[in-house]
Amino acid sequence: MIATVILGLVYYTLYLYRSPISVGNPVLELIGGGRPIQVRLVLEKEAVANLQNHRLYPVESGMSQPVFLIDETDHDLIILIHVDEEERALKLNKSAVQSVLYLP
């Protein structure tokens, strides 16, 4: 029993925790992988002004600049942005997000 737990921890540490996130792989999506995922967002027109203030949503483009998705809850997306050469977390309401494009 103890050997099974130890082998499970070793397997998780070596093969799952440090692996890059693979969209569509339910094991890695469930566990997380420990890294933010690079995405581009398409937002509702009312929400675009907020990201344009941070220069993340160009007027001519239909989607945001690449940002890092840190976490996703039932109601919010938490993304990592760069403001004045500093990293900041920004929480977006999911109702303002039309789609999320996962980047490789």
Image: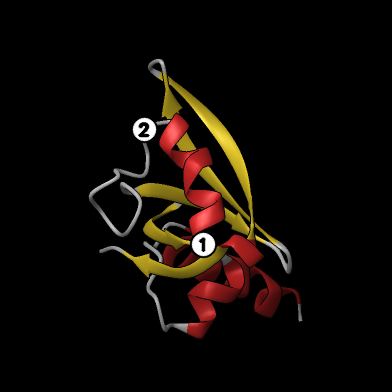
Q: Which residue is mark 2?
A: 55
- Sequence-wise, the earlier of marks 1 and 2 is 1
Image quarter where the C terminus lies is bottom left
In the structure shown, which secondary structural element does the residue marked by tag 1 occupy? loop
**Could you tell me how far apart the alpha carbons at marks 1 and 2 are, in whole angstroms?**
16 Å
- Label count reads 2
Q: Position of residue 45 (x, y in %)?
A: 49, 57
Q: Which residue is mark 1?
A: 44
- Can residue 15 be seen here? The reply is yes
Mark 2 belongs to which amino acid? Answer: Arg
**Residue 68 to residue 53: above or below:** below
Image quarter where the N terminus lies is bottom right
**Residue 70 to residue 85: above or below:** below
Q: Residues within 10 Å of mark 2 (few under 14, many from 20)?
A: some
Q: Residue at x 56, y 53 (%)?
A: 46
Instruction: Give the image quarter of residue 82.
Output: top left
In the structure shown, which secondary structural element does the residue marked by tag 2 occupy? loop
Q: Position of residue 37 (x, y in %)?
A: 42, 56
From the viewer's perspective, tell me whether residue 27 is left or right of residue 84.
Answer: right
Q: Residue at x 58, y 36 (%)?
A: 89
Q: Position of residue 49 (x, y in %)?
A: 49, 41
From the viewer's perspective, tell me whether residue 28 is left or right of residue 3.
Answer: left
Residue sitting farthest toward the right: 1
Q: Residues within 10 Å of mark 1 (few under 14, many from 20)?
A: few
Mark 1 belongs to which amino acid? Answer: Glu
Q: Badges 1 and 2: C-beta atoms under 8 Å apart?
A: no
